[in-house]
């Protein structure tokens, strides 16, 4: 079991999906957030959920003892920047592993490959596939807390720029499919079909 705290980022705007993707049903769970939480708590000693509005996730605190970390008041800013600032304000930890709520196929193998570099002094360790970088799948160190605060204050929210100017290790993966994001209804339906096929579940 991984000792590094895991934070599921579930505070996005979901504009391309047309509805809150974090609340869509998935893989037998009432919501994608519950699916991610249930599987990740089997891998990590501590799992947290970063969100914009904790009230939407009452079902977790009532039944599953999940710890919700609600973003600081940033009006209509839905960028991960607010989550990072809030998390490091809230948790007394040196590093966190972050994963977007809409990446249900990233598993123990990918996470372990990233975390095996965690004691090598990097500010952040990020997954990289042939098609690009995956800023919301990786390790972030508290050394970036002030950087995130400055980004928030200056309304600069591009994580790619942060990675390029920080001491970042990019861990390469050849399998692109496990890093699928569920950004729109088509990708969501494809993910449901894939899950059923991989688990031999009748639709």
Image (cartoon, rainbow, N blue to C red):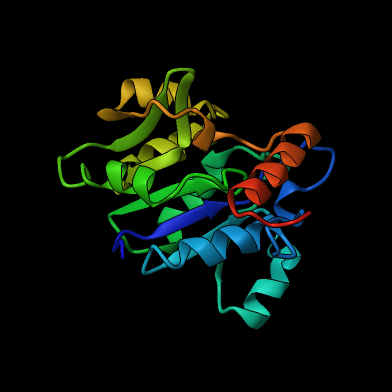
Residue under the point 31% across and 65% down: 1
Residue under the point 71% across and 43% down: 193
Which residue is situated farthest in the right direction here?
18
Residue 32 position, x and y percent, is 67, 55
Quadrant assignment, res 4 = bottom left
Quadrant assignment, res 45 = bottom left
Residue under the point 59% across and 48% down: 198
Residue under the point 64% across and 48% down: 195
Q: How many marks?
A: 0
Q: Is residue 139 above or below residue 176?
A: below
Judge from the rendering whether residue 8 lies leftward or rightward of residue 119; answer left or right: right
Quadrant where the image shows the C terminus:
bottom right
Between residue 199 and residue 129, name the one nearer to us: 199
Judge from the rendering whether residue 40 lies leftward or rightward of residue 9; answer left or right: left
Residue 150 position, x and y percent, is 44, 34
Q: Residue 145: in sight, yes or no?
A: no
Residue 112 position, x and y percent, is 30, 48
Quadrant assignment, res 125 = top left
Between residue 103 and residue 168, name the one nearer to us: 103
Judge from the rendering whether residue 165 lies leftward or rightward of residue 8; answer left or right: left
Between residue 175 and residue 33, name the one nearer to us: 175
Residue 168 position, x and y percent, is 28, 29
Q: Residue 150: in sight, yes or no?
A: yes
């Amino acid at each position: 079991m991984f000792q590094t705290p895991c934070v599921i980022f579930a505070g996005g705007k979901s504009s391309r999906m047309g509805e809150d993707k974090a609340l869509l049903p998935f893989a037998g769970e009432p919501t994608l957030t519950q699916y991610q939480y249930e599987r990740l708590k089997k891998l990590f000693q501590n799992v947290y959920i970063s969100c914009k509005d904790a009230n939407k996730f009452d079902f977790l605190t009532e039944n599953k003892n999940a710890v919700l970390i609600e973003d600081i008041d940033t009006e209509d800013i839905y960028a991960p920047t607010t989550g990072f600032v809030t998390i490091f304000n809230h948790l007394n930890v040196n590093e966190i592993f972050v994963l977007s709520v809409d990446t249900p196929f990233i598993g123990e193998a990918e996470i372990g490959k990233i975390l095996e570099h965690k004691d090598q002094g990097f500010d952040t360790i990020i997954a990289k596939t042939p098609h690009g970088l995956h800023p919301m799948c990786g390790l972030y160190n508290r050394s970036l807390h002030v950087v995130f605060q400055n980004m928030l204050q200056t309304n600069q929210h591009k994580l790619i720029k942060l990675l390029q100017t920080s001491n970042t290790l990019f861990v390469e993966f050849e399998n692109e499919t496990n890093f699928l994001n569920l950004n729109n209804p088509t990708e969501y339906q494809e993910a449901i079909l894939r899950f059923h096929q991989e688990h031999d579940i009748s639709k």
